[in-house]
Amino acid sequence: MSTSLEPFDNFKTTFHKTFSHQPCLVIEVVQSNLPPSPWSGNNNNNTQICCQPYFDPSKNGGGYEIAFYDNGYAYYEALEGDRFRKRLERYNPQMEFQDFKKVLEKMKQIFEESSTNKNDNQIIVQLLNDDVLIVEIKGRIKSSIPFTYMFQCQRREGEFYEANYVRQIVYGLAERKSRELELIKLIQAKDKELDDYRSQGICQLQRSWLATQPFDKEDFDKSTSRQVQQRHDDVLMHTLDLAFDREGQQLIEECLLRNEYRKRAYPSQDNTSSTKKNLSSQKSTPHKQQSTLSQPLTEEQIDAERRRHKELEERLRSERERDEQIARKKKKKFV
């Protein structure tokens, strides 16, 4: 790496981050019609979803980019300026919005506190069709004034899912593995240091029950494998929480910024990757091209689709209740 580059710590403080540098977080939802995820756990169906929110108060007076990831699909929306203001006023007619920065901070707070303060921060997820995901957030301003906003996200193709969500998972996994190996090296070095003290007769343990065996990686792997069932259950029940906890988000953000830092040291490799990306986009199927060129739904179409969806749900609920009543009457006949 070139020595003329500024130190990485300085780079982190001055680099302007964008949506692609925002780590994902896990949000709790109070209602969802999404199909269960294979990693959501037996007791956690449809209550969590991965979100990549980027709120920028300086962008055209204020705006955001946001993506939701579920079951191999990505749903994305970007909104700013007057369009953002109009939607705010539409869902909050009792309010006057002058400072977008405070509004964006409130929206960010709702996401971050969706699991710790569910009473005041609620999120509802509704998939209208294969291409539109509606995410409604509800919170309170000054503990009493209700605040509502609705994201209207369009489904994006696989390249978007891989470039953002999959990349963050791989970065986080690689970084945690790297730190595990460094920790093992540190433990082994400590064992050597203690052995040297003992050989000189200057290290004597006063409390014998604190004595430990020298660390052996093979024995460690074998002993932990015996506990695989319990650990496997924990991972299945808390997969997203473990992958995108606070530490995981910090690791991912560090990797994303180091990647940008590395691009400055090796600009030629960055150009090569851009060329590959362009070639990959040219290989897209006609179906993908058609989906990319499709126009987003209007506000009225979104509302109409949501009403239709609610009518269908109500009809299904009525039919289910009717079937249950019929079943109960039949059971009474057989008693």
Image (cartoon, helix red, strand yellow):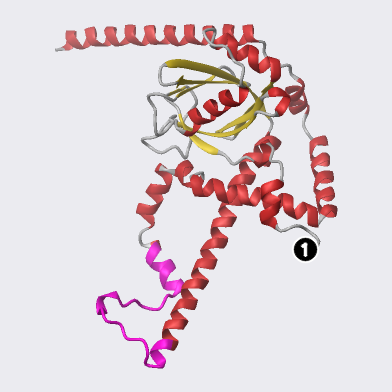
Q: Quadrant of residue 198?
A: bottom left
Using residue 62 as the reference point, say whether residue 271 is left or right of it. right
Q: Position of residue 14 (x, y in %)?
A: 71, 46
Q: Is residue 169 found inside the magenta-colored segment of the image?
A: no
Disc 1, SS: loop
What residue appears at the point 41 percent right and 38 percent down from the top-left corner? 41
Vertical placement of 86 versus 266: above or below?
A: above
Residue position for label 1: 1
Vertical placement of 24 versus 131: above or below?
A: below
Q: Is residue 223 found inside the magenta-colored segment of the image?
A: yes
Q: Position of residue 316 (x, y in %)?
A: 42, 10
Q: Position of residue 271 (x, y in %)?
A: 84, 48
Callout 1 amino acid: Met
The local crowd at label 1, few if under 14, some if 14 to 19, many if 20 or more residues have their Cα within 10 Å, is few
Vertical placement of 187 versus 2: above or below?
A: below
Q: Nearer the viewer, residue 325 or 89?
A: 89
Q: Quadrant of residue 63?
A: top right
What residue appears at the point 83 percent right and 35 percent down from the top-left corner? 282
Using residue 220 as the reference point, say whether residue 323 is left or right of it. left
- Magenta residues span 197-224
Q: Quadrant of residue 149?
A: top right
What residue appears at the point 41 percent right and 93 percent down from the top-left corner? 200
Q: Position of residue 82 (x, y in %)?
A: 70, 15
